[in-house]
Every structure is written in C-alpha cells, then in structure tokens.
Image (cartoon, grey):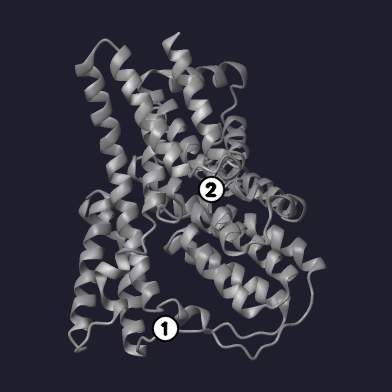
Amino acid sequence: MILTAIAIIFVLGYLAIALEHPIKVNKTASALFLGTLLWIIWFKVSGDTHRSSEQLFHSFGDLAQILFFLMGAMTIVAIVDANDGFSIITSRIKTNDVRALMWIISWIAFFLSAVLDNLTTTIVMVTLSRKLVEDSKMRLYLAGVIVIAANSGGAWSPIGDVTTTMLWIGGEISAAGIVKVLILPSIVSLLVPLAVLSISIKGRINSDFQVATQESSSFDRNVLFTAGVGGLLMVPVIKTVFHVPPYIAMLFILGILWTVVELLGRRHQVLPQRLNIYHVIKEVDVPSVLFFAGILLAVGVLGATGQLASLAKILEDNIGHTSIIVLIIGVLSAVVDNVPLVAATMGMYSLQEFPMDNFLWEFIAFCAGTGGSMLVIGSAAGVAAMGIDRNLSFGWYLRKITPLAALGYGSGAGTYLLLSDFIFHTVK
C-alpha cells in the first residue's frame, strides 16, 4: 500500500512538472517538493531510519557529483558569454542563403553542444538566428533544427547532455567509448532531417548584418574563449589521465578560468561587470540545477523502495528485447523529461549485469538524448527555444518539426543498431 502511494505521488508530482504552464507553478518548485516529500514519507514508513539514511546518503552522493559538475560547467559558460567569447564563432557566419544558413547554424550547434551542452548551445544559436533572419516563419524553422542539432550533438559527448553526463559520472559509459559508437548515429539523426527540410526551405536574407557585441576587448574575448572552451574540452582528458571524478576536473578548470579573469581584471582601474565573477555568477541558471536535484531525489526514493527494479522486471517479462525497451524509453523522453527516465534506468539495471560501455548504456545515451527532440517540451533545448522565440508553439512544432525529428531519431537509432550488429556485434 505504501509503495503504491509513493508511486502515485511520484506520478502526480510529475504531472505537475509537465503541466508547469497551465497550473502556473514553476517546475523547479514542484520537483523539489516532490523529491523531499517522498524521502520524508519513506523515512517515516520504512521502519529502519539507519538504513533509510544510508540510502539517502548514497543517493545524494551521486546527486552531488552531478550538481557540482553542472554548476561548474554553467559558470564557465556564463563567464565566456559575459565577455562575448562566443562571437568568435558567430561573427564568422556570412551568407545570405537561408538554406546555407540553416546548414551552417545546425552543424555549429551540433559540435558546439558536444563541447558545451545542448541547453547553452540552443540559447546561443537561437538568439543568433533571430539577429540574422527577419522573417518570423524562417526563424521558427531555424529554431526547430537548432533543437534537433543541439540534442543530437549532446548525445555523443560525455559533457553534451545532462543525461550522458549522468551515465558518464555513474560509470555506465566512458568518454572515449561513447564518442566512438555514437558520433555517426548522431550525425545521421541530424543529417536526415536537414536533408528533408532542405527540399522545401528556400529564400534569401540580408547579408548586411551586425552581431551586437559587449564592451570587451578582442584580447579578453580570445583569452577567455580559449581558456573556457579549451578547458571544457580538457575535462574528459583530466578525468581519464588522473582517474578523478568528472566534477573535480570541471571545478579545476573553473578555478583556472576564475584566476585568468582575476588577472585580466587587474588591467582596469574600475572593474567592469563582465570581469566581476560575483556579478557573472548571478547569471547562472540555479533553478535548473535545483530542478535536477529535485528530480533525482524523487527517483532515488523509487530506487530505494525497489520499484525501479520491479519496473525493469516487468519490461523484461513483457517485452524482453533490450533494443525495443530502450527505443520506448527514447520515445517517452519526448513526453517526459529525459533526466528522470535515465536516472530511473540507471536504477533499473546494475553495472554487474551491464558493465561500462555495454550496448544498453550506449543505446540509452543516444535514445534519451535525441528522443526529446520529437516534442518541443521534450528537452531542455526545446523549452529554451520556446522561451527565446514566443512564436514557437507546441502545435507548430508538432506539425512541422516533430515528423522531421522522429525521422532523424529512427534513422540514427537504426544506424546505431546496424553498427552494433555488424561491426561491434553487441546488439541484444
């Protein structure tokens, strides 16, 4: 009875998160309330406070690693962005053909999201597209393909998507392994929608545009872009070479970048806000970090109560085929947030049965990362795009972009399964 009640509360809490806009309650508030409420209930009814404390300690230990990693990464990105470092990339986009612009922006978003993350990349690229294109309809198509590109690009990198980061930190995948097996399927998942959309999209734009920049010198932009983005690229290397947790490597890079900012600030008699770390940190999206905390706390209770293991058994008994189960998880990630889905999957299957770089974890990384593109609310990238362009509605995305995203998802998944079967011989 108690376990059923916990499951019902979890579902109701999840509905509150999904219906954030209709009920006018921020999803972070709902997630935090849900996660803490479930632990309070479990402590009360478990009958073993010591064991419940150990379960919470274990769950929060994994959670803390992810949160510190995210906070470090988001702060690095905020520092680079505050000094207009990303203009080094965006200022080089020179074309007046909409089709060419769509391909250029999409592939920049694809590779940029692998280095940064899909959320930040979407914000940067959608904002840029709004400066380059006046036609509102064309902006919507660009925003749609940017969402697909950012999610596809984040799927093959250990730091490109929070779910892939969770799997990397949890030991389910390795940095080199995930890049090797998912780079080609991820490319296909973007290439196919782009090719199809290119058939119908055409037109020209005014090439005489100027991307607004902040008051930062070229020297500052170059130094901070190199230190920030270069540092992010070094995180997997540091983790692999020194065998430290990823969040230690990320905080190490943040410490270096922070020092560089302090040294640059000495050149000014009056410290500009862009070099004032305390001002820049205010721009970090703390609500998103707390949202992940609430969700992962809630999923931790389902793991502690054994319900995730029970769900895994139900799926195995009724479906059995691992590939189909993971494909379903990917489709579900378009309806609900992929963070709890991946967190739940990590609780459903053990590393003893499915060790690092197993087919299961690799396929989950791809499906959960790219499946969210099929609905605009299915990923953080889609939600961010809606926030920037108010004309990007759920209905328009469903009609115009969802079929393309679904085609890309199926093509990419099929590519991975073929590679796994004929090259890696790991399909289950």
Disc 1 secondary structure class? loop
For residue 214, which numbered disc appears in the image?
A: 1
Decide: few, some or many residues near mark 2? Use Cα within 10 Å; few <14, some 14-19, many ≥20.
many
**In the picture, which quadrant includes the N terminus?**
top left
Q: Is residue 306 left or right of residue 270?
A: right
For residue 231, which numbered disc appears in the image?
A: none
Q: Nearer the viewer, mark 1 or mark 2?
A: 1
- Report the residue at 21% width, 69% height from top: 256
- The foreground one among 242 and 230 is 230
The residue beneath circle 2 is 369
Decide: few, some or many residues near mark 1? Use Cα within 10 Å; few <14, some 14-19, many ≥20.
some
- Report the residue at 43% width, 37% height from top: 31
Q: Is residue 83 left or right of residue 13?
A: left
- The foreground one among 403 and 241 is 403
Question: What type is the residue that disc 1 sits on?
Answer: Gln
Q: Position of residue 77 (x, y in %)?
A: 37, 66
Question: In this picture, is 39 found above or below 202?
Answer: above
Q: Position of residue 170 (x, y in %)?
A: 34, 40
- Report the residue at 25% width, 37% height from top: 61
Q: Position of residue 371 (x, y in %)?
A: 60, 45
Q: CA distance from mark 1 to mark 2?
A: 33 Å
Name the residue at the front extreme: 24
Can residue 425 be seen at all in this image of the molecule? Answer: no
Q: Earlier in the sequence, mark 1 or mark 2?
A: 1
Q: Quadrant of residue 35?
A: top left
- Report the residue at 48% width, 23% height from top: 9
Question: In this picture, is 44 found above or below 154?
Answer: above
Q: Position of residue 176 (x, y in %)?
A: 39, 53
Question: What type is the residue that disc 2 sits on?
Answer: Gly
Disc 2 secondary structure class? helix
